[in-house]
């Protein structure tokens, strides 16, 4: 392993943060303004001789692209420099956090509102870059940094295309295959809508835990160009179907069928979430609560049973609402209960007859008693009156 240098330009080297095929990232210190920085480096001898100039040109362009941007969700670039020993470096904002890729690798679950927030910050960063004519072309979880406080930072503009630059010609294929747009695979000229396709792939991964296009390079390319991924709600039943439509539009094969701006994409996500949080309530029929007989609803525990407010039988049974719709009552006819008057009179006559029978039973002189007989010893006058009223009523019918 090569020895860590003590300085790069004016920056003091403190430690190595990571390394890749073409360079190393160090934690550095700017003594002039007492600021911690990240130093991304690339050495000429670490590159193949034929590609050295091209890679160095891209490295310098990363500094030029990110250096144009000033946004809270974009990793800030401070300076590009070349050390006398042949090391080129970019001094940039030191980000204390972790890559989104690490969270995906851990199969970490994100609440839906958190997904919309993170995607909103990513799309805000992309929208800002697009306004300055910069297409990132390598939007992927490894380039999205999650700070400890939850803020999102987006960086690594190494293969970004700047509208005024001719370094990347039509026909070159650059990017990470699983997140590349169809036009990138076909070597066509790309614009900001290609970045939005890649953002749609990340959204899909948020919702399902899986990449939409898997396999070897040729398999991925075929799927990206020809196949639509399975809707997220079919892989994760907790995903509302409204998000299927957002993903489908973001990952449309044709750029003119996608969201045309990052803002439009972000608005669609927020609208989908708002539709769930403030969904209209279905009107319910009015329910009239009847008076509850408290004594009838209390179940006393048996001896030795804990006083839990409900017996074991009640606990095993499902809860039932005390509220029941009360049907309208028909208009009363003849009386409140709707019973014909002649029936009431017959009933009254029977009661009187029963009273008379009871009287004779008590006097130990049982006789046949008729409510219509004038010879009834008890209440004979009342029985006669009932008989007259009943006969009158029946003659009127």
Image (cartoon, grey):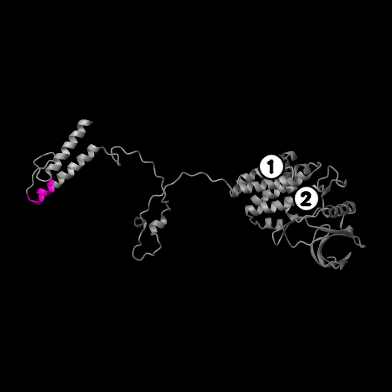
Q: Identify which residue, 47 or 299, lies in the foreground.
A: 299
Task: List x then y, in percent, for residue 65.
Answer: 83, 52
Q: Is residue 375 in sight in this rendering?
A: yes
Q: Main secondary structure of the magenta part?
A: helix
Horizontal side of 299 relative to 267 (left or right) equals left
State the separation of the CA atoms marked 1 and 2: 21 Å
Of mark 1 and mark 2, the one earlier in the sequence is: 2
Q: Which residues are magenta?
A: 356-364
Q: Residues within 10 Å of mark 1 (few under 14, many from 20)?
A: some
Please name the residue that numbered disc 2 is placed on.
Answer: 128
Q: Position of residue 177 (x, y in %)?
A: 75, 48
Foreground residue, 206 or 182?
206
x, y percent for residue 305: 37, 64
Q: Is residue 361 magenta?
A: yes
Q: With respect to residue 291, does 189 lie above or below?
A: above
Looking at the rendered image, the quarter that the N terminus falls into is: bottom right
Identify which residue, 180 or 263, lies in the foreground.
Answer: 263
Label 2 Cα neighbours within 10 Å, binned few <14 / some 14-19 / many ≥20: some
In the picture, the disc for residue 249 is 1
Left or right: residue 318 compared with residue 268: left
Q: Is residue 18 left or right of residue 339?
A: right
Q: Secondary structure at mark 1?
A: helix
Task: Spot the residue most to the left.
Answer: 365
Q: Is residue 214 visible?
A: no
**Quarter that holds the C terminus:** top left
Mark 2 lies on a secondary structure that is helix
**x, y (%) of residue 124?**
74, 51
């Amino acid at each position: 392993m090569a020895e860590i240098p003590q300085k790069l330009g004016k920056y003091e080297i403190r430690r190595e943060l990571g390394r890749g095929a073409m360079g190393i990232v160090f934690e550095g210190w700017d003594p002039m303004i007492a600021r911690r920085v990240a130093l991304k480096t690339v050495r000429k001898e670490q590159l193949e001789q034929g590609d050295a100039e091209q890679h160095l040109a891209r490295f310098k362009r990363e500094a030029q692209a990110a250096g144009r941007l000033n946004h809270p969700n974009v990793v800030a670039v401070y300076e590009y420099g070349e050390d006398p020993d042949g090391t080129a470096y970019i001094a940039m904002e030191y980000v204390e956090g972790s890559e989104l890729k690490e969270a995906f690798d851990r199969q970490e679950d994100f609440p839906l509102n958190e997904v919309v927030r993170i995607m909103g910050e990513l799309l805000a960063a992309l929208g800002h870059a697009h306004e300055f004519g910069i297409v990132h072309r390598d939007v992927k979880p490894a380039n999205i940094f999650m700070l400890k406080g939850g803020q999102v930072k987006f960086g690594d503009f190494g293969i970004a295309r700047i509208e005024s630059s001719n370094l990347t010609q039509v026909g070159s294929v650059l990017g990470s295959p699983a997140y590349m747009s169809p036009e990138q695979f076909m070597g066509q000229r790309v614009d900001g809508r290609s970045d939005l396709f890649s953002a749609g792939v990340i959204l899909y991964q948020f919702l399902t835990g899986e990449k939409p296009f898997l396999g070897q390079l040729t398999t991925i390319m075929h799927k990206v160009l020809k196949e639509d991924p399975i809707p997220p709600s079919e892989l994760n039943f907790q995903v509302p179907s409204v998000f299927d439509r957002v993903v489908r539009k973001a990952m449309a094969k044709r750029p003119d069928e996608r969201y045309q701006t990052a803002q439009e994409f972000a608005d669609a996500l927020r609208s989908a979430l708002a539709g769930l949080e403030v969904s209209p309530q279905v009107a319910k029929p009015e329910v009239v609560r009847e008076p509850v007989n408290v004594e009838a609803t209390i179940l006393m525990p048996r001896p030795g049973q804990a006083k839990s407010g409900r017996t074991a039988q009640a606990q095993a049974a499902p809860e039932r609402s005390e509220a029941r719709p009360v049907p309208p009552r028909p208009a009363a006819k003849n009386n409140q209960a709707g019973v014909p008057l002649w029936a009431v009179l017959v009933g009254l006559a029977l009661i009187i007859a029963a009273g008379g029978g009871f009287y004779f039973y008590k006097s130990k002189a049982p006789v046949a008693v008729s409510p219509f007989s004038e010879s009834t010893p008890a209440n004979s006058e009342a029985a006669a009156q009932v008989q007259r009223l009943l006969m009158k009523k029946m003659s009127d019918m």
